[in-house]
Amino acid sequence: MSSAIVEALTSLLGAGRVSVEAADLEAHAGDWSSRALLAYRAGDAPTSPVAVVRPVGAGEVGRLLGWAEKTSTPVVPFGGGSSVVRGIEGRGHIVVDLSGLDHVSDVDVKSRLVSAGAGVTGPQMRAALGKSGFMLGHEPQSHDISTVGGWVSTRACGQLSARYGGIEKLIAGLEAVLPGGRTIESKVAPRRSTGPDLGALMIGSEGTLGIVTRVTLRVSPIPEDRADACVRFDQMSDAIAACRALAQSRLAPTLVRAYDAEDSVLLTMSLNDPPAGPLLLMSFDGDDAIARAESAVRLTNGERLGDSIVGHWWNNRNAAVDEYSRNMSGTGLLGPHAMLDTMEVAGTWTVLRDLYHSMKDHLVEHADFVTCHVSHIYPDGACLYFTLAKSCSDDVEAAASSEKWWDVGMTTCLEAGGTISHHHGIGRLRAPWLPEELGGSLEVLRAVKRALDPRGIMNPGVLGLDAR
């Protein structure tokens, strides 16, 4: 069967676009989720795809999905592979690697728009926009290893979202290929009242409804000035209150991150004479940045600390990616059987304080340490980003700990009135809790899935849409 698939794919795209090399198949078998990394560490790697295919345009993606629907072959889209929620898995499937869709258009300076292929990486986008003096403002921690298509498909959110918004705010239009090979394209306009936007349906669909191939994005001029400020509090509840005041003010911060006492230790551990937390980090850019930063300090009622702490964050903001990889490979500080994971949830300001305390109190019973920071703020609420770690006696204990964390974390989140994912998405990891999260809406999504993908070929298992 697999040889027939490879032969058919080669006929569709040519031998140079189809790979069955063992190393290539293994590299596309799983994502960066703790479950996948644990499996690799234990010598039980996720099931490899039958083949990895690399199309270079929407036309080739269309031919692939047309063939896949006719043959009922499962398809798993692959951007940078940086999902942490088991977004990349399968059996008897092909992986569609979108790295060949890497074109970035010139910036439309008048409209401040740019068009980019789904395979464009964060560094490629930054370099392309920087030539014209623009930036996207989308800075996820996975920036250097993730792609435009992945950002859209997972409804991602970057660290500067307080000013620039999540990816959904930056999307002006997109092109996607549906199962069977049909292409849809949403017209680029500042706003439209032309019925439901089918393109918007792809945002957050995690490859279950089709493959995003091209995106038109709103860009901003690179700011000339930046002002930082750091304040500390005695209680995390005071830091959360300060975040709310900032979110509901007119100060337009670019960065707002409030670290609880335990997370502050991790943030500042490499500094000389690190301060005790909780800590609130803020950055402002553009006009009157310094004045807005000073006003923010007064608004928070916190103790002003040196601004260099914020500079330290800027210089090391994505270092956790490597630390996570080291620990999950068994070569980090937590030892050979480490379990390390992150869990981001969100809630309104009305429930956020209780959401923080209830989740932390329940999770700390099952981990060596649990830390949390407020990572994204809005006038009506915020995201809580938990980090959990445990030094286990063996990989069996590590797997059991992970199972317990997610069961406790998701159940507690729902009971406290939070939403179970802010920007990592659902994948297969969170799918068991999506029925309670969405209620009757889930069956509507399943009906959409059945209509667009009647043979269930697109990323089976993700979002739990295949359940009947």
Image (spheres, helix red, strand yellow):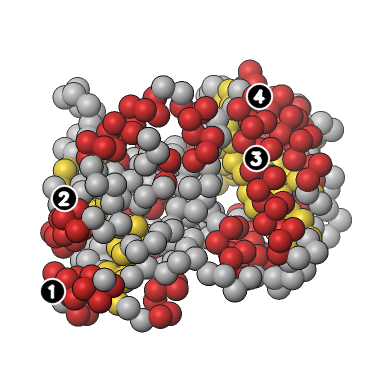
Residue 180's disc is 2
Find out whether the residues at labels 4 and 1 contact each other: C-beta distance under 8 Å: no
Which numbered mark, 4 or 1, is in the foreground of this view? Answer: 1
- How far apart marks 4 and 2 lie (CA) works out to 42 Å
Badge 3 is on which residue? 407
Name the residue nearer the viewer: 113 or 259.
Answer: 259
Q: Earlier in the sequence, mark 3 or mark 2?
A: 2
Q: Secondary structure at mark 4?
A: loop
| Residue 13 in the image: above or below residue 103 | below
Q: Earlier in the sequence, mark 4 or mark 3?
A: 3
**Residue 382: % across, % down:** 58, 31
Kind of residue sitting beneath label 3: Asp
For residue 220, say whether it is visible.
no
For residue 466, say whether it is visible.
yes
Kind of residue sitting beneath label 4: Ala
- How far apart marks 4 and 3 lie (CA) works out to 14 Å
Badge 4 is on which residue? 416
Is 57 left or right of 94, judged from the image as shown?
A: left
Q: Which residue appears at 33% of the width and 46% of the height?
A: 208
Q: Which residue appears at 32% of the width and 78% of the height?
A: 20
Q: Which residue appears at 24% of the width and 43% of the height?
A: 453
- How far apart marks 4 and 1 lie (CA) works out to 54 Å
Residue 263's disc is none
Badge 1 is on which residue? 11
Is 339 left or right of 420, judged from the image as shown?
A: right
Q: Quadrant of residue 121?
A: bottom left
Q: Quadrant of residue 243?
A: top right
Local packing at callout 3 (Cα closer than 10 Å; few below 14, some 14-19, many 20+) is some
Q: Earlier in the sequence, mark 4 or mark 1?
A: 1
Find out whether the residues at labels 3 and 2 contact each other: C-beta distance under 8 Å: no
Find out whether the residues at labels 4 and 2 contact each other: C-beta distance under 8 Å: no
Local packing at callout 2 (Cα closer than 10 Å; few below 14, some 14-19, many 20+) is many
